[in-house]
Amino acid sequence: MTRPSATPTIQVDDDRFRVTEWRFAPGAETGWHTHELPYVVVPQTTGTLTVETTSAAPFAMECTAGVSYSREPGAHHNLVNDRDVPFTFVEIEAKAGPSA
């Protein structure tokens, strides 16, 4: 099954952070990827995304607009908007700590 791709827009990409807005049309996916950096996600939409992983069955992840969550790097996964309405979140990847 071929799904449309979610649309990433990089808002900041400097030596400390990468901030990306992800917009999902209905049925869109990020594509399989592995995070190499710790990250925070700030949902802009309330609803669910389907998380596909190589280690477990797909599951629905509940998101609430404005309620952030963080993850460590390493998990190989794909996010899918199985809903019939658009979904958006902002992802903030931490590249390095503050300068000394």
Image (cartoon, rainbow, N blue to C red):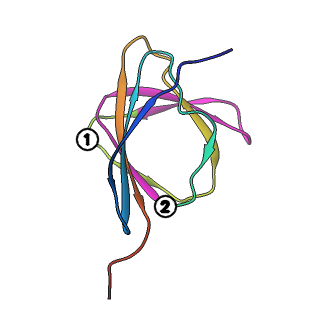
100 shown above or below 80:
below
The residue that disc 2 covers is: 38
Q: Residue 66 has which mark?
A: 1
User: What x and y, as percent, mark residue 18?
Assistant: 38, 56
Please name the amino acid that badge 2 sits on.
Pro
| Precedes in sequence: disc 1 or disc 2 | 2
Q: Report whether 99 appears left or right of 34.
A: left
- The amino acid type of the residue labelled 1 equals Gly
Q: In which quadrant is the C terminus drawn?
A: bottom left
Image depth: mark 1 or mark 2 in front: 2
Q: Secondary structure at mark 2?
A: loop
Q: Which structural element holds mark 1? A: loop
Q: Is residue 43 above or below residue 13?
A: above
Q: Residue at 44% across / 15% down in the picture?
A: 26
Is residue 57 magenta-colored?
yes
Give the left or right position of residue 33, taking residue 63 as reference. right
Majority SS type along the magenta span: strand
Local crowd size for mark 1, using a 10 Å CA cut-off: few (<14), some (14–19), many (≥20): some
Extreme residue toward the right, this view: 55
Give the quarter of the figure containing the N terminus.
top right
Dividing the picture into quadrants, the one containing residue 65 is top left
Residue pictured at 52% horizontal, 25% vertical: 5
Q: Residue furthest top?
A: 84
Residue 90 image point, x, y percent: 34, 42
As drawn, the label of residue 6 is none
Q: Spatial distance from mark 1 to mark 2, Cα to Cα?
A: 19 Å
Question: For the point 44% across and 26% down, which residue is it?
Answer: 48
- Which sits in the foreground, 70 or 8? 8
Q: What segment is highlighted magenta in the picture?
A: 39-62
Camera-side residue of 7 and 58: 7
| Quadrant hosting residue 66 | top left
